[in-house]
Amino acid sequence: MTSQHHDNPSPVHIIVNARKRDVAGKTITYEQVVALAFPDDPSASQFLYSVHYVGPHMPDGTLATGQSVTLKNGMKFDVTKTNRS
């Protein structure tokens, strides 16, 4: 019996603000990273976030609203709040 769907890939192991997270999919968006970093923050819309990442075998980078990056096991994301100006 063969599977018709390959939509459930193995989880990717990442670190967001020093916390281990397992996520599914091939990419992750700015919004998803922010939600992982601050899951219980009701004031999230009042802040901008700086999202920086490093990963194995890839250049370091940043994410802005609406952007995404291809996931790799072991990626590290640092997310910090900044006030809207």
Image (cartoon, grey):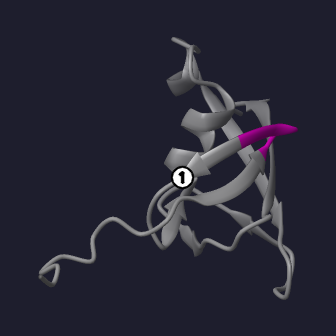
**Relative vertical location of residue 42 with respect to residue 36 in this rendering, above or below:** above
Give the residue at x 78% y 64%.
75
Q: Which residues are magenta?
A: 16-20
**Residue 10 or residue 65, whichever sits in front:** 10
**Left or right for 35, reference 60:** left
Q: What predominant SS class does the magenta segment belong to?
A: strand
Residue 25: x %, y % from top left = 44, 66
**Left or right for 22, reference 45:** right
Residue 64: x %, y % from top left = 62, 59
**Left or right for 25, reference 3:** right
Q: Which quadrant is the C terminus positioned in? A: top right
**Relative vertical location of residue 60 with respect to residue 77 in this rendering, above or below:** below
| Residue that mark 1 sits on | 23
- Asked if the magenta segment contains residue 71, the reply would be no
Judged from this view, the residue extending furthest toward the front is: 1
Residue 69: x %, y % from top left = 59, 73
**Left or right for 43, reference 18:** left
Report helix, strand or loop for mark 1. Answer: strand
**Relative vertical location of residue 77 with respect to residue 75 in this rendering, above or below:** above
Question: Which of the 4 quarters of the picture holds residue 81?
Answer: top right
Count the labels in the image: 1
| Crowd class of label 1 (few under 14; some 14 to 19; many from 20; radius 10 Å) | some
**Relative vertical location of residue 31 with respect to residue 9 in this rendering, above or below:** above
Residue 50: x %, y % from top left = 76, 47
Amino acid type at mark 1 = Val
Give the residue at x 76% y 41%.
20
Question: Which of the 4 quarters of the picture holds residue 16?
Answer: top right
Give the residue at x 50% y 70%.
27
**Residue 60 or residue 23, whichever sits in front:** 23
